[in-house]
Amino acid sequence: MKQQQDDNIHETLKDAAIYLAEYAATLMAVGAQTSRVQLNTLRTARALGFEANLLVFPKTLSITLLDAEHNRTYTYIKATPRTGINFKANMRLSALSWRAFDRRLPLKALWRMFRLIMKEKGENRWLVLLLASLANMCFCRLFDGNLTSMAIVFAATLAGFLLRQELTRRGMNHLAVFTMCAFVSTMIGATDYLWFHGGTEDISLGTSMLYLVPGVPLINGVMDIVDGHALDGIARLTGACLLIICIAVGLSATVVMLDIDPTTFTKVVRPDVVRAAVADGLFAAVAGAGFAIISNPPRKALLVCALLACVGHGARYFLMHHAGLELDLVTASAAAAFVIGLLAVPFAMRLHCPAECFAFPSLLPMVPGMFAYKAVRDLINIVRLPDDYTMEYVARFFHNTSLTVLVMFGMVVGCIVPIFIFHRQSFSVTRK
């Protein structure tokens, strides 16, 4: 009799551990930060009547379940699947943990709801393609590109993103996909140098591949490090850096093959700061919504992403260019990101959606893509130009690289401070 009871408890622990491991691994794969993964998983384990210990590693996770008397344990290890960023699944899975906790749902019901969530179709690929192209076109405008540059960047993004969709659907390695897409997009972006000569040729080339910048993994990586999950944060940042290197390889191939001199950089001065800030905000709204849809957010989040991107980018422009302020890029970016994070929390509570579903896409128009482009450009020139110019471009490379890193760190810290201040509200917004 006792043996049969032990076997039953063992099977119950095993079944629960398999579900919880699948749940946690899926949350990691769809782009949830490590703290949310742990809180949601442990909450579900308590709802099932178990105590859980969860160890999250870069590519795997391990969960150990203990029964109520701590007499029996079961450990299960699960590899993290590669599903891509999916904010809608993040929201639904977070809500599922609260439903399990509040209603004490049985394991079979949880499995059924979990599978239904994962079967939900993403956004129409053609709609994503169109909005991503419009977003990068507006991104080009945020860096002072003219109408010619905007048209070229739209075409470059359309071709590159379509290629990305097709290669990803065929299961090609994601590093190779990013390299090829960056090459195709920058080749189209370089046509401004070769044929059109629209006046902002450098912007056409520099922004043509910025739709590939892995903004969400970069933001998640910094957030994990700040939140104490250094191993996962470093792993996410390393993966994002590998993707950036692939983008740089594609750009370098274009520059070398076409023998382009990308050393110039256009800067447009707008005398009316308020009107310019409003215009920047409106273009950032389109960019924010377009970049958001790539990550498959809930439809109700798109307008909020557009609004927050508009307010954030407009505020940063005003802080940097107003005669009485003239803040540096790092400080202005951190302040604007703080505003975005502060506004994201009440919207998250209102719409029952994690704050990062609004905040992260809204930050993407402020990602210092052009400074990253300049850093890659300087690295290319270190290799290509004579020794007399080497030290100049070494200094420029470290300047632009440092600025890119500091702006990213300032943005993420500014954005997550309100989320940490309102920690309880931020991690319970999906509870209905």
Image (tube, grey):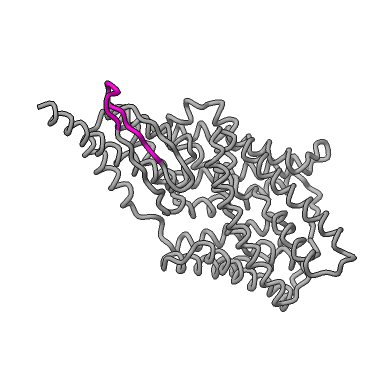
Please tell me which residue is depicted at 21% across the width and 39% down the height of the picture: 108
Q: Is residue 278 above or below residue 67?
A: below
Q: Residue furthest right?
A: 388
Does residue 286 show up? no
Q: Nearer the viewer, residue 39 or 137?
A: 39
Q: Position of residue 112 (x, y in %)?
A: 24, 43
Q: Position of residue 56 (x, y in %)?
A: 45, 39
Q: Nearer the viewer, residue 318 or 156?
A: 156
Does residue 428 show up? yes
The C terminus is located in which quarter? Answer: top left
Give the residues drawn in magenta, as a range: 62-73
Side (left or right) of 379 relative to 336: right
Please tell me which residue is depicted at 53% across the width and 66% down the height of the picture: 176
- Residue 64 within the segment the image draws in magenta: yes
Q: Residue furthest left?
A: 1
Please tell me which residue is depicted at 60% across the width and 36% down the height of the picture: 415
User: Number of callouts in the render?
Assistant: 0
Q: Position of residue 40 (x, y in %)?
A: 39, 34
Please tell me which residue is depicted at 39% across the width and 37% down the height of the picture: 94
Side (left or right) of 58 relative to 314: left
